[in-house]
Amino acid sequence: MKKESTIQKNKGAAMMIVVFFFMFISLTILIGIVTPVVREFKIASDNYSSKQSYFIAESGAEDLVYRIKNNMETGTMGDNRTLFLNNIYTTIPMELTDIGGGRKQIIATGNVNSNERTVGLTLTTTTGTSFNYGVQSGIGGVYLDSGTINGNVYSNGPITASSSGGNIITGTAISANSPSAIFDQSNGTGIPAYNISFGNNDSTQDVAQSFMVSSSSALNKVQLYLKSSGSPSDAIVKIVNDSSNKPGSTVIASGPLSASKVTSSYNWIDVSFTTNPVLNIGTKYWLVIDASTSSRKYYIIGASNGGYGNGVGNIGQSGGTWNNTTPSGLDYYFNLYLGGPTGSITGYGPDNQVKIGTISGSAQAHTVSSTTSSGNIYCAVGISNNKPCLSQPDPVYIAYPVSDGNLNEWKDAATAGGQYNGNYSVGPWPNQNVNFGPKKIVGDLTVSNGGTLNITGTLWVTGNLVLDGGGLIKLASSFGSNDAVIVVNGTISISGGGHATGSGVSGSYIMLYTTDSSDSAATINGGAGAVIIYAPNGTINVSGGASLKEATGNKLNITGGSSITYESGLANNNFSSGPSGSWGIDSWGESQ
């Protein structure tokens, strides 16, 4: 019996050992299965929290950008910001820092369950001015005599090459049909008797002016007498049909109204149309400004009572209800241009052709003659070219990239820095290296004899600007990638190795703007640099191997082996002056 009892005890112990090992192995297997699941769940949870953190940081940054761009309260630097996100109030650590050169840096941090993500961005002040062509001219056109344009050309007049040969445009060359120098329809001069706000709510979103033309010519452009409150969005200007003495729904022509050209003071704003239809004499049409709505950011147009006999003003909404103005019978200030000569691109005979698109591009004009193009040639009339004409509508007039309102803002910014009476010279010792600006100079500005003028703000020169004798005008390093302007009432002369340039940072340029209307408004004979020459009323003469980055003028003469080399950064210039300059986003991304 004792032996049997011992055997039973041994069997029980063995069974317990088997059960123990079974449970141990099962638990090991279970842990092996559960642990990866838990780990994957933790990873998924962290990823979700990380994404939440990122979106929180983005929301905080966007909120601060919105406040800055709309002149709202932003708090002090380093403040946390509380936003209502995902049905809860979330506190977002924020940093807002002025980093110089008209730039602000924003850093926003999101933190959910200890998963932290940071977003950083940089804002720069800008008037929205864009130079999309290496050369842009008015009705005076472009003349090449052994000259090279590295980039595209858009001319509102003829593009003509001389007999010297070697005339090259490496990109696309476009010669548009020019607008008439005399408008066909016009209303409004002097200070408006009435100021009509629109774009501020749905019932006053748009304005419309009826008119009838007196000549059967192609439509080219319109001028509108506008100012703004706040910074409204871009608008569309349309010519539409008449429907029972109200604007109809058929769009005959349209063109963009750039909000950046409209300032807080009244100015005539040019608007170009994308097509040039011929309007019929005696037919009623409507000129419509189609805007978006904002109670804080809207347009204001000048108006008169009974000053225009060929139409009447309305206010309302495109596609909706139109009403008479208050008081009734007002007419808006506008000028309508028709006609103008057709565009042309002309080389000097079969043996001295102008070469278009040597890198990539096409030739586009009503008439193209004695031209070699690597791309297509679009024209109605083609003579002695390397390719036949392909059909497309004639190129249309485009407005200059800078408005009178922009110019007035730059003048105001210079004047705010004080006034210097008399001629100002930088050159021989002790005035060899000078920091200067913003300032209005009532006199001439001369930089010569190896002198250096470091621009620290916008300048306005009421006399002439002379840069010669190895003189240098450059932007202070604080401008960074931003740009600046020197406005000149008189002429601009660069010669003798004179040089003008940006801050030294890529994408920084200096614009020399002259309002002079003579044939020598700007003369560049050798030298130049990272400079934009702007002479909307006069002629720019580039010779003597000079090299610059962009030229816009009523007429351009590029001769003597000179060149203009366009850079892509010119498409988004940030002129960091002007009281109504808006804020543009220079960079935006996640910070490490």
Image (spheres, grey):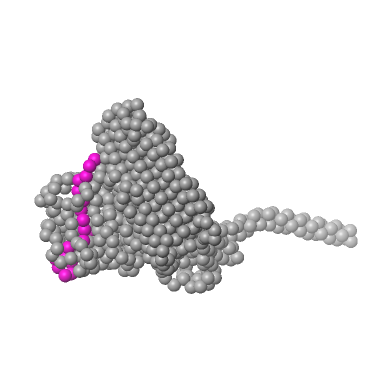
Up/down of 554 relative to 55, above or below: above
Q: Which sits in the foreground, 460 or 230?
A: 460
Residue at (39% x, 47% y) in the render: 523
Task: Estimate the x, y position of residue 477 in percent, counting from the top left.
Answer: 53, 58
Residue at (27% x, 31% y) in the render: 382
Callout count: 0
Would residue 75 appear left or right of 266 to someone viewing this image? right
Examine the image and state in which quarter residue 68 appears.
bottom left
Residue that protrudes farthest toward the right in the picture: 2
Q: Which sits in the foreground, 310 or 63?
A: 310
Residue that protrudes farthest toward the left in the picture: 282
Q: Which contiguous range is marked in magenta?
A: 318-342
Would residue 388 appear left or right of 82 to someone viewing this image? left
Task: Estimate the x, y position of residue 341 in percent, counting from the top left.
Answer: 22, 42
Q: Which sits in the foreground, 138 or 23?
A: 138
Does the magenta portion include 341? yes
Task: Estimate the x, y position of residue 486 in percent, counting from the top left.
Answer: 41, 57
Up/down of 505 relative to 364, above or below: below
Task: Estimate the x, y position of residue 417 in percent, counting from the top left.
Answer: 43, 67
Q: The N terminus lies in which quarter of the figure?
A: bottom right
Residue at (53% x, 63% y) in the render: 99
Question: Is residue 588 in view from this perspective?
Answer: no
Residue at (49% x, 58% y) in the render: 426
